Image (cartoon, rainbow, N blue to C red):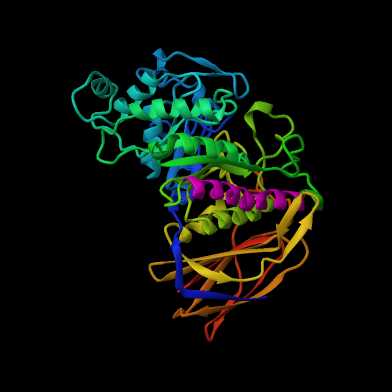
Amino acid sequence: MKAKLNYSEKLGKISKYIYGQFAEHLGRCIYEGVYVEDDSVPNVNGMRCDVVNALKELEIPVLRWPGGCFADDYHWRDGIGDKESRPYMVNTNWGGVVENNHFGTHEFFELCEQLGTEPYICGNVGSGSVREMRDWIEYMTFDGDSPLANERRRNGREKPWKLKFFGIGNEAWGCGGGMRAEYYADLLRQYSTYLKDYGDEPLYKIACGADKRDTDWTDKVMKSVGGRMSAISLHNYSFERDWDHKGSSVDFDEHGWYSNMASAYLMKETIAAHKKVMDENDPDGKIALIVDEWGDWYDVLPGTNPGFLYQQNTVRDAVAGMMTLHIFHENNDRVYMANIAQMINVLQAMILTEGDQIVLTPTYHLFKMMKGHMDGERLALDYDEKPYDTDNGKAVKISMSASEKDGVITLSACNTSLTDGEDIEIELSGADAKNASALVITGEMNAHNTFDEPDNVKPENMVVTLSNGVLSFKLPAKSAAVITVK
């Protein structure tokens, strides 16, 4: 296959926030995942050193917390002050387990500071109040003399935290309140009015958006709320077939592979449908689209709590993940942030933990390989995706994306075929390229890393040649590769 990259045709910045993460009080994401309550695992202020050190390698730009469905059941005052005095609750959304609230606001910001990432907090609209949300913002961000700021100081934090991203509710159409779009839009107008800017930077207010292709929700919220929000969210997961037939994360066949690829590729049509509505309501493009929940969702691993959403992570997830990230790249005029679900031990996780052990998943390696795209200028890249049909919809064999940052070209390419590699030649028009190197993730379709065999799937060097301005390589079947050109 021949392709052409036009170095002089820049198509806008690929926001680093597209590579955001999501950590919910769900299963073992927080407790045992990033946070421990004793010294059974080396930690700094409760944050696992092994997990934090591994995540720092990803240069995570933003981290969403505390949910998810948990957010609209979470009352922030329960998670501050002396830990032993904090009231416990039952996490009715996820497994019916006891939540002791030992990981709260201060602990979340501690994690963000250790990771060097920006916080994105999702507030409680479903079971909360305007005053509760307003007070939380003041508690976190006010530097003056007020009862709430002084309470924060008594709890150990003198200076306010920097908080830019704030979500006004989560899935208000579902677990966040079962609301109609019109009703949520009225609440959004009310809540937004009381969310004051106490810091140097105004709050970036993110409205609760739609589930998958529900463009009617997007249309009604945008028509009613308009300039009171900075962005609107979208949730879109990939399944082997559908919600009732998610499939296994490891025990799947050829049909399971291709069905999932088609489901992941649907992100392209989904974003296009919402962008059309957004363009009609906001022709100047002032309101961004935030895909703050996405990823592959399968049945839980046998023998685990169904409410913990614990699954494995294979080569399939790395390939589908790259294809989805490319779709976000292509829509960089609207898509400003995306948050894969979820960071540790839940759904398409970066890391799995068991006691004092951790495993880096194929998706972890994918995100580490793709870092060069963050805040890079997207480059025009002309190629044939080689589309094909599955019984779960359309998919493509080849997906590619290219960007430039600080004189370095990052080109990523994945091949969804289980059987056929692809010989690729890319003309680098206008680029003064001297050398190229490449890493690839590939293997058997259901290959994954375990605590006994943690390196089954990891990036390997891939042969790539650069001659007379033409980049050549063979992209293996079922693979995701990143080529760096300098």
Relative to residue 185, is residue 227 drawn left or right?
left
Image quadrant holding the N terminus, namely bottom right
- Asked if one can make out residue 225 in the rendered structure from this viewpoint, the answer is yes
Q: Determine the image quadrant of residue 130.
A: top left
Residue 22, percent from left and from top: 51, 39
| Image: magenta residue range | 258-281
Q: Determine the image quadrant of residue 341.
A: top right
Q: In this view, does 35 lie above or below 54?
A: above
Image quadrant holding the C terminus, namely bottom left
Residue 125, percent from left and from top: 47, 24
What secondary structure characterizes most of the magenta part? helix
Tally of numbered tags: 0
Q: Nearer the viewer, residue 396 or 173?
A: 173
Q: Residue at left 61%, top 74%?
A: 463
Q: Residue at left 45%, top 13%?
A: 87
Residue 252, percent from left and from top: 78, 46
- Asked if one can make out residue 343 in the rendered structure from this viewpoint, the answer is no
Q: Which of 433 and 29 is in front in this view?
A: 433
Q: Which of 391 and 194 is in front in this view?
A: 194
Is 384 in the magenta?
A: no
Q: Residue at left 61%, top 19%?
A: 96
Residue 4, percent from left and from top: 57, 76
Q: Residue furthest left?
A: 145
Q: Which residue lies furthest to the bottom in this view?
A: 468
Relative to residue 219, is residue 75 drawn left or right?
left
Q: In this view, does 473 lie above or below 293?
A: below
Q: Residue at left 58%, top 25%?
A: 175
